[in-house]
Image: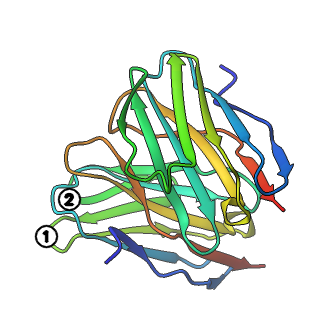
Amino acid sequence: QKEVEQNSGPLSVPEGAIASLNCTYSDRGSQSFFWYRQYSGKSPELIMFIYSNGDKEDGRFTAQLNKASQYVSLLIRDSQPSDSATYLCAAINTGGFKTIFGAGTRLFVKA
Amino acid sequence: DAGVIQSPRHEVTEMGQEVTLRCKPISGHNSLFWYRQTMMRGLELLIYFNNNVPIDDSGMPEDRFSAKMPNASFSTLKIQPSEPRDSAVYFCASSQAEGEKLFFGSGTQLSVL
């Protein structure tokens, strides 16, 4: 079992819709979770992080964490074509030393 | 700040040759990570350093791979001898402290023919 799992997609949504990206993790001791965005041919860049159960909002982005279910999600409201990218879910392992990435979900926002 | 700086951006080499990838982390960051990204395996952690000391190299695939961090501003990842299956994008990333967000360099696209 991979430590961080994501649906590879692609996920296709129309412009203006809500995109929902999901992630599960296997290390129950993980405390910190991140969403990175990676455009084709570019390096990953952080867009959200979340440490506590519940929702965290930042502009059009909302991260959700449920530690009991070992589940992390990212919602993108009012999706724009510029949001088309691969979204990588990441977790810090028990001990707080390593950032482990999921395989990423490719998102396409159609104009 | 200039961000994490990697060199070269692209490297094309022949099987059996030595390859050295270089990284300069963000000043003041004390954790440095080397990742490899391929379509098949995604983003894999190879090794990470904290305060210039290698903490976990369990992701290094074989003895052909080695990494050093002689000081706080420089790290190298060496592959000797290189093989075609080493072809990938190699990213260096740094963070201010363990467990914090990562800042990635632009990556090195390695092609081993």
**Quarter occupied by the N terminus of chain A:** bottom left
Q: What mark, if any, has residue B103 been given in the picture?
A: none
Relative image position of residue A99 (x, y in whole percent): 39, 49
- When the figure is inspected, residue A8 is found, relative to residue B25, above or below; the finding is below
Q: Residue at x 57, y 84 (%)?
A: A9
Q: Residue at x 57, y 23 (%)?
A: B26
Q: What mark, if any, has residue A53 been given in the picture?
A: 2
Does residue A56 appear to the left or right of A21 in the view shown?
left
Query: Which dot, 1 or 2, sits closer to the camera?
Result: 1
Residue type marked 1: Ala
Q: Residue at x 69, y 77 (%)?
A: A109
Which residue position holds label 1?
Answer: A68
Residue type marked 2: Asn
Q: Secondary structure at mark 2?
A: loop
Q: Are marks 1 and 2 in contact (CB under 8 Å)?
A: yes
**Residue closer to the observer: B15 or B10:** B15
